[in-house]
Image: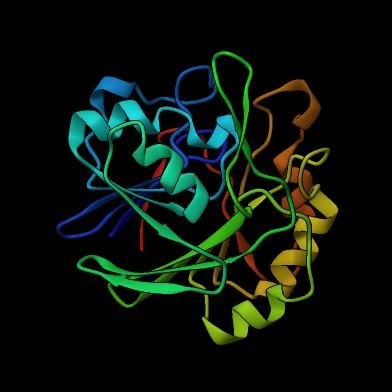
Amino acid sequence: MQISYHGHSIVKIKTGNCTILIDPFITGNKLTDLEVGNEKPDIILLTHGHNDHVGDTVAIAKASDALVIAPNELAVYLSWQGIRTHGMNIGGACKFEFGTVKYTQAFHSSSYTTETNDIIYTGMPAGILVMVEEKTIYHAGDTAIFSDMEMIGKRHPIDVAFVPIGDNFTMGPEDAACAVKLLNPQLAVPIHFNTFPPIEQDPETFKALVEGHEVKIMIAGEVFEL
């Protein structure tokens, strides 16, 4: 399969018969290489309800008829916008035609701000395990470090872990390096940094702090095979 990174927290997974797009924040994302009108995923996965993660989900899903998988309250809210959704919750797993999705805990917050500045509660924030083609990809979402990351890594050996390093709203480089040690992935990729001034970080700092694990610093549009 092909895995690509597209700025902020956007990750794309292309399997033999499915394209999965995670947290498609495109409009307003100065770091992405994507254009909303060009994205035709089969599946959209969302970690939580913040606008810089939900992003262009509704527009993309309406154009492509993608199934949106999200924390339950967020899935319900998005279904009111006229798209297909499947709600899940922390600790739950579900088998789909393309593979299995399991939601893990994340320590953060989760709400969606509408154009009229109404704040909509969107359930608990989460990380996502995607188990497809005998590989396991972990997208940590927005989170602080937590000790159960070790259990997640032991229960579901991780091939690639995408971890936030931006600090201020999530883990910074130091905590993210500790998180990699707990998760024990084959490969770690930093995400959620440099999009906005409060989360400006040098990913090389994170890489230097990680011991015993491969780290791949990706630019928007970069692809690797798994």
Q: Position of residue 177 (x, y in %)?
A: 77, 60
In the image, 30 versus 151, the foreground residue is 151
96 horizontally vs 72: left or right = left
Q: Is residue 201 visible?
A: yes
How many numbered discs sit on the rendered protein? 0
At x 75%, y 62%, the residue is 210
- Farthest residue in the top direction? 116
Q: Quick check: 114 above or below 180?
A: above
Residue 77 lies, in percent from the top left, at 45, 39
Q: Quadrant of the C terminus?
A: bottom left
Task: Please tell me whether residue 46 is drawn above or below residue 39 in the rendered image.
Answer: below
Q: In the image as oriented, which residue stretches furthest toward the left?
A: 17
Instruction: State the residue in front, 46 or 214.
Output: 46
Quadrant into which the N terminus falls: bottom left
Q: Name the residue nearer the viewer: 42 or 73.
A: 73
- Side (left or right) of 13 relative to 113: left
Residue 117 place in picture, x, y as percent: 63, 17
Task: Tell me what residue is drawn at x 48 percent, y 73 percent.
Answer: 92
Identify whether 65 is placed above or below 146.
above
Colour option used: rainbow
- Residue 218 in the image, given as x and y percentages of width and height: 53, 42
Q: Residue at x 78, y 61 (%)?
A: 145
Quadrant housing residue 118: top right
